[in-house]
Image: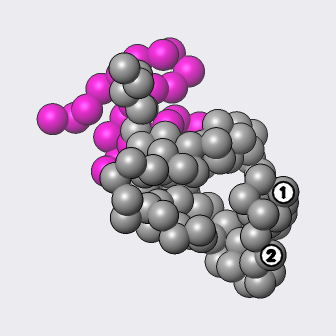
């Protein structure tokens, strides 16, 4: 059984599945197709990576891992969306939040939902 994703992983997975560059996210059997991008992207975001770095990662992964040749605007637009989501969720301030903005962790290692 797969462990439950934290709020940041869950929110990022949702974004990647909405983007769906290879067109498979509608198939329930492969909704985890982009999970290979979760850890590297979250590491980059938590480390303060900018839109250019995120776009470069996405372009490289689409080309090398998925075998696609995307237009450069596609990873750039998705990188902007990822950065926007990360900032809106309050993560840029150093405290990780879930996709709805609830606190899921931080320097103290606490978890809370605000509900």
Residue at 30% across, 26% down: 112
Which residues are the magenta region? 94-115
Direction from residue 2 to residue 39 in the image, left or right: right
Q: How many C-alpha atoms fall within 10 Å of the one at disc 1: few (<14), some, or many (≥20)?
A: few
Q: Residue 5 in the image: state x and y as whole percent.
A: 42, 32
User: Mark 1 to mark 2: distance in Å?
Assistant: 9 Å
Image quadrant for the C terminus? top left
Q: Residue 71 in the image: state x and y as whole percent.
A: 77, 84
Asked if residue 100 lies in the magenta stretch, the reply is: yes
Q: Residue 97 in the image: state x and y as whole percent.
A: 43, 41
| Residue 4 or residue 20, whichever sits in front | 20
Direction from residue 115 to residue 110 in the image, left or right: right
Asked if residue 47 lies in the magenta stretch, the reply is: no
Q: Residue 86 in the image: state x and y as whole percent.
A: 54, 54
Give the residue pinned by disc 2: 69
Give the residue pinned by disc 1: 64
Whether the residues at callouts 1 and 2 have beta carbons within 8 Å, the answer is no
**Residue 42 in view in this figure:** no
As helix, strand or loop, the secondary structure at mark 2 comes to loop
């Amino acid at each position: 059984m797969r462990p439950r994703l934290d709020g940041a992983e869950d929110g990022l997975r949702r974004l990647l599945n909405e983007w769906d560059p290879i067109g498979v996210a509608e198939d329930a059997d492969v909704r985890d197709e982009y999970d290979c991008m979760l850890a590297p992207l979250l590491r980059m975001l938590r480390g303060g990576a900018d839109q250019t770095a995120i776009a470069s990662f996405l372009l490289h992964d689409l080309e090398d891992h998925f075998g696609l040749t995307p237009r450069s605007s596609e990873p750039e637009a998705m990188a902007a969306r990822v950065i926007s989501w990360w900032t809106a969720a309050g993560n840029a301030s150093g405290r990780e939040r879930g996709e709805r903005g609830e606190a899921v962790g931080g320097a103290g290692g606490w978890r809370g939902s605000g509900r």
